[in-house]
Amino acid sequence: MSGEGYGKKLIGKANVYIHEKGKSNARITHVDIELDELNKIIKPGEASYVRAKEGGVFIGLKKEMISRAEELLFGKRREKPEVNKNEKEK
């Protein structure tokens, strides 16, 4: 696990559960990560990609999710810089 580092922002401590199939409406056994801040990045019903890493997991984000994550980091949505057409033609 890499922990704190440059370019990382702690968003909270999550509750993590193994949710057993057939209990509390689970159709399959799965892992629940419960943290309200995550729903500011990944909205309920959206799908993402998860890969195991040493000491934890990596959650890959789609473009819209990246925009929401950057909004949490920087306080507003980052826009792509506009390219000056005159400079592009040079």
Image (cartoon, rainbow, N blue to C red):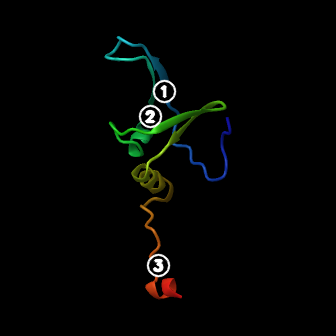
Q: Which residue shows up at 42% across the image and 61% down it?
A: 77
Left or right of 18 on screen, residue 57: right
Q: Are marks 1 and 2 in contact (CB under 8 Å)?
A: yes
Question: Which residue is identified by label 1?
Answer: 15
Image quarter of residue 51: top right
**On the rendered image, what quadrant is the N terminus found in?**
top right
Q: Residue at x 54, y 88 (%)?
A: 90
Numbered badge on residue 83 = 3
Q: Position of residue 59 (x, y in %)?
A: 51, 39
Relative height, residue 78 to residue 33 (above, below): below
Name the amino acid, label 2: Leu
Q: Which residue is mark 2?
A: 35
Q: Residue 58: x and y, percent?
A: 56, 38
Q: Amino acid at mark 1?
A: Asn
Q: Report, in whole angstroms, how far the alpha carbon at label 3 lies from the one at label 2.
A: 38 Å
Labelled disc at residue 49:
none
* Quarter location, residue 52: top right
